[in-house]
Image (cartoon, helix red, strand yellow):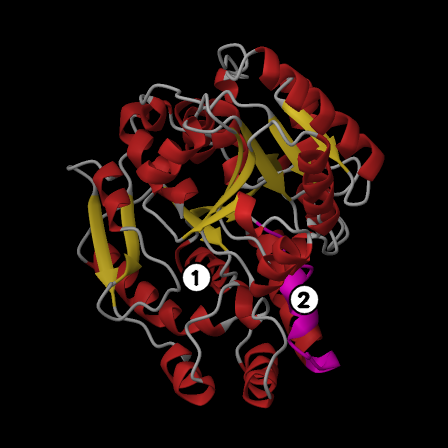
Amino acid sequence: MQRCLKWVKHLPEMGVEPTVITVDPAVAAYPVLDPSLEADVPAGVRVLRTSTIEPFGAYQKLTNRPIPHGGFANEGRPSLAQRVARFVRGNLFLPDPRRGWNRFVLRQVDELLEAGERFDAVLTSSPPHSTQLIGLELKRRYGLRWLADMRDPWTDIYYNQALHRTALARRIDARYERQVLEAADVVITTSSDTRRLLLGKASGLPTNKFVVLPNGYDEADFRQPSAPPTDQLLITYVGTITGQYHVQPFLEEVAACAQRHPDVPLRLQFVGRVGKEVERQIAQAGLQERTDLLEFVPHDQAVGYLLRSTALLLAIPDVPHNLGILPGKLFEYMAANKPIICIGPTGSDAAHILDEAHAGMAFGYDDRRDMQEHLKQLVASWQQNPNLDLPAFSHSRYSRRALTQRLAGLIRG
């Protein structure tokens, strides 16, 4: 969501006037909301809100569970009702349960064009990948220049494996994906690996229409001063983390480091949604007394937690096709100028960016020896000076403004 939000914030500066079509909050169903981010929408930008039809209310009644993250896939061990819900979602709602919104968007666009308005381009961003079918239909109806922003893989997205899809459902979804990739004028991805993955989905796809436009950071979000604690070595993780992130080896190495250095107040802090499995791993490692678990907070407060940390923990889920996962938090971590500890697959795009920017170290999920050595060095540096902030962040190509400038060029063609 922040990717599109920041584009809308900066596009008017680039001479591009966006009209936003989104869901009416009175009927929207999402696991987390952050109304504070509305302040980033410029006063002159028109935002049109439509109705929608979604199955999430029925899901909540059926399972007595909150609206799920990640397509029903990250809820721990599913109950019978949840397994049924996953099967229904994976086979009857293609590409996804958000498709009920499409008819309302198409009706809204029809009304705008019938009223005589003209648009130079349409931009659709996903997931949910059903949003791309809106762009596909608008391309067919009106021939508008169409940019399809693919923040994640489509048929290869990690949670599809938990949806019990039949062969027929997989074929239908793959056909939707192929139609979008073939019809879009520009396909935008967040990483080189995702670009490579999508290029392999159909023969004859022109490589020059597939463009990598990563996530980034907004300079305006980092006007607060950095204030690392002097009384503790605090490693912070911000966002959602579940058992799929495979951080247990790292947690155990942190516990071992704390035992080796009882005089160092080493602490962990998780800000956001922490899965039950990760909570168990923290307890099993003996880190409960050294760990703070904080609920979801608005974005500006989350940035404050980054700036009041010694180092930052980044984790990439241990799922198929994860080399190209570039979380938006990676660039905000870098903007905070704290040393980053990244746990993920060897050779990932995230690891390459960290190495290029000299912003931290990346470790494979089970690289215990390297983790141990790095934590040892971190402690030694902290004992010399508790402020481990890195040199001023100067990688302006990852700023939201610079990235939006590139997007404006793509819109103009």
Cα distance between the residues tagged 2 and 1: 16 Å
Name the kind of residue labelled 2 in the image.
Ala
Name the kind of residue labelled 1 in the image.
Ile
Residue 374, image x, y percentages:
73, 26
Whether residue 158 is in magenta: the answer is yes
Q: Nearer the viewer, residue 73 or 362?
A: 362
* Farthest front residue in view: 263
Q: Nearer the viewer, residue 323 or 339?
A: 339
Is residue 289 at all visible to an observer of this figure?
A: yes
> In the image, what residue occupies the spot 72% across and 46% down?
252
On the rendered structure, is 96 left or right of 51? Answer: right
The residue identified by callout 1 is: 134
> In the image, what residue occupies the spot 19% across and 51% down?
116
Kindly state the secondary structure of the residue where label 2 is placed: helix
Q: Which residues are magenta?
A: 152-168
Residue 321, image x, y percentages:
73, 51
Residue 175, image x, y percentages:
66, 67
Is residue 157 at all visible to an observer of this figure?
A: no
> In the image, what residue occupies the spot 54% across and 68% down?
71
Residue 396, image x, y percentages:
48, 17
Task: Tell me, yes or no, whether the two marked residues, 2 and 1, touch with CB atoms within 8 Å.
Answer: no
Whether residue 294 is in magenta: the answer is no
| Mark 2 burial class by Cα count in 10 Å: few <14, some 14-19, many 20+ | some
Q: Earlier in the sequence, mark 2 or mark 1?
A: 1
> In the image, what residue occupies the spot 72% across and 53% down?
318
In the rendered view, would you say 271 is above or below 404? Answer: below
On the rendered structure, is 122 left or right of 19? Answer: right
The residue identified by callout 2 is: 174
On the rendered structure, is 369 left or right of 188? Answer: right
Kindly state the secondary structure of the residue where label 1 is placed: helix
